Amino acid sequence: MNNPQPNKDYYFDENGLLVFTENYLLQRSYCCGNGCRHCPYEYINVPEEKRLALLKLQKIHDEQK
């Protein structure tokens, strides 16, 4: 996981925020608990109230694809 690569491992969103990709987060191999946009671990380490909200948003986003 040394030297994350732009576009493959992260990008900057429309607000200029750094966003890690699912690819990068899978390499990390655990949920950090920060509520990452592309978390492949179902936000398992995020506090429950925030976790439920994030899962709901993720479901809505997936249905729009």
Image (tube, rainbow, N blue to C red):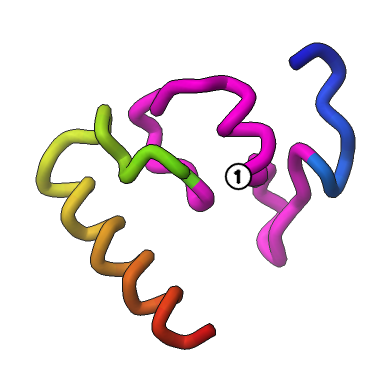
Question: Quick check: is 14 in the magenta stretch?
Answer: yes
Q: Note whether 56 is above or below 48 in the view shown.
A: below
Label 1, secondary structure: give it. helix
Q: Note whether 2 is above or below 49 in the view shown.
A: above
Residue, far top: 2
* Left or right position of 25 against 14: left
Q: Amino acid at mark 1?
A: Glu
Asked which quadrant contains residue 32, the reply is top left
* Left or right position of 2 against 45: right
Residue 39 in the image, given as x and y percentages of width and height: 46, 43
* Left or right position of 27 against 16: left
- Residue drawn 68% across the image and 43% down it: 18
- Residue drawn 25% across the image and 67% down it: 56
Give the magenta range.
Answer: 9-38
Asked which quadrant contains residue 21, the reply is top right
Callout count? 1
| Quadrant in which the N terminus appears | top right
Question: Which one is in front, 10 or 25?
Answer: 25
Residue 47 in the image, given as x and y percentages of width and height: 17, 35
| Crowdedness near tag 1: few (<14), some (14–19) or many (≥20) residues, C-alpha within 10 Å | some
Residue 7 in the image, given as x and y percentages of width and height: 85, 48
- Residue drawn 34% across the image and 29% down it: 33
Question: Quick check: is 29 in the magenta stretch?
Answer: yes
- Residue drawn 33% across the image and 71% down it: 59
Q: Which residue is mark 1?
A: 22
Asked which quadrant contains residue 45, the reply is top left
Residue 55 in the image, given as x and y percentages of width and height: 27, 58
Q: Note whether 3 is above or below 20 in the view shown.
A: above
